[in-house]
Image: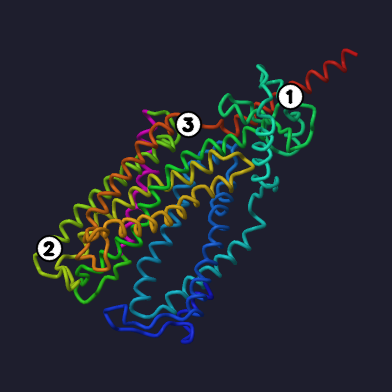
Amino acid sequence: MSVLTLSVSIPSLKPPPCHDTNLDNCKKASTLQLAVFYGALYTLAVGTGGTKPNISTIGADQFDEFHPKEKAQKLSFFNWWMFSIFFGTLFANTVLVWLQDNVGWTLGYALPTLGLAISIGVFVTGTPFYRHKLPTGSPFIKMAQVILASIRKWRVPLPNDPKELYELGSEVYEKKGNYRIDSTPTLRFLSKAAVKTGSTSPWLLCSITQVEETKQMVRMLPILVSTFVPSIMLAQVNTLFVKQGTTLQRAVGNFKIPPASLIGFVTLSMLISVVLYDRFFVKIIRKWTKNPRGITLLQRMGIGMVLHTLLMAVASVTERHRLSVAREHGVVKNAGQVPLSIFILLPQFVLMGVADAFLEVAKIEFFYDQAPENMKSLGTSYSMTTLGVGSFLSSFLLSTVSDLTKRNGHHGWILNNLNDSHLDYYYAFFSLLSFTNFIFFLPISKCYVYKAEVSDSIQVLTEELKATRLRESNDKNAQ
């Protein structure tokens, strides 16, 4: 963030100013200027990859699974965590955007840089008071051991009795503060890693618990894939939706609305939806479902996907209306301003916020909740991965559709001049894509088996240990 601020502040690092409406006539940024700017952006991306999965994970880890009140509070944690994230986003999309448009980019970037520095100080100050989980080794190595051992023993038959598979003693798990997971019939091929063949190498023999942890991460992969398309929809907010806003009338009295500020309506609707969901919807619906969350996490994600389908359909209809008005007033070829208020885009921004309240919150909670205890950060990183993949896929689809629709002399759907484009077709395509993804999501969500509650698993382990010690005590007394 510091380098990003410098790149818009120091004259030698900024590209030369240009006021020509035809960008092709502007002088391009130098290699150094591009290197500094993009270097800062990619450094920010790397930093975000390290913080986002772990901030939510360490936050959720502060709740004790064995304390009834804290366990109940944890069910609302991700709602309010996302609330705080979007509250910051609201400031960015309103105050910061206005400052960048009307005061300058230096102040616009300097303020979040200062805010980040303060947040680091808050984090460091609070670190001694957090509940910390001890590191247990790389989850990637553990998963690689299971997969490789299974492949190397692919011809070895599985025993009929799962108790014949290799497992560590209960005392080992108690000492490490972990819990044991019983063998499950799903993904049986991976269970071969726990078949005893005489070797004790961790790359040839893995415990049932290690195998089941790997299975849990693998079982989430189809759900992970199904979230790529919703992330593509989310990427449209910061790109095409804002680009549409630049073509419309933005004046409200003497105040001119920055197009990027419309994203604030996504944030506002999301904030309101989260509060209503957590305080009212859950309390009402769980009377019928008997589920502490009201509905399951996958059901919540499914509702978000349906809303995405509706959202893109609404965006397509709105864009068709905008294009018809552009044609009526003869501003198609000259890319002039369309005599429509920017607020006609409000429904699609609001719907995106409501969809986020369902899908994005449920997504991050699902991948955290369903990941093994020793792989929570990796599980949370699944939800962050979908955002990155969605952004890349969005860029790929934009360039691919733009290229394909211009072939053989056709006009093309996506041009620099939006008044002469066909974004309505593109949004209709996204609505169909989102609906197809929802159809893909239905069977895999229905077949998904949720993992057992942590507290239940440890309770079983504790009872087994008590029974073992009681037997040992009775044996000693008998002797």
Answer left or right for 165 relative to 90: right
Give neighbour class at mark 1: few <14, some 14-19, many 20+ (Cα, 10 Å): few
- Cα separation, mark 2 vs mark 3, equals 48 Å
Label 3: state its secondary structure: loop
At label 2, the amino acid type is: Val
Q: Nearer the viewer, mark 1 or mark 3?
A: 3
The residue under the point 65% across, 31% down is 458
**Image height check: is 43 above or below 432?**
below
Location of residue 430 in the rendering, given as x and y in whole percent from the top left corner:
30, 49
223 magenta-colored = no
Q: Residues within 10 Å of mark 2 (few under 14, many from 20)?
A: some
Mark 1 lies on residue:
466
Amino acid tagged 3? Tyr
* 28 is higher (above) or lower (below) than 123: below
Residue 298, horizontal then vertical, whole percent:
42, 37
User: Which stretch appears magenta?
Assistant: 262-288
**Residue 334 position by quadrant:** bottom left
According to the picture, the residue beneath numbered tag 3 turns out to be 448
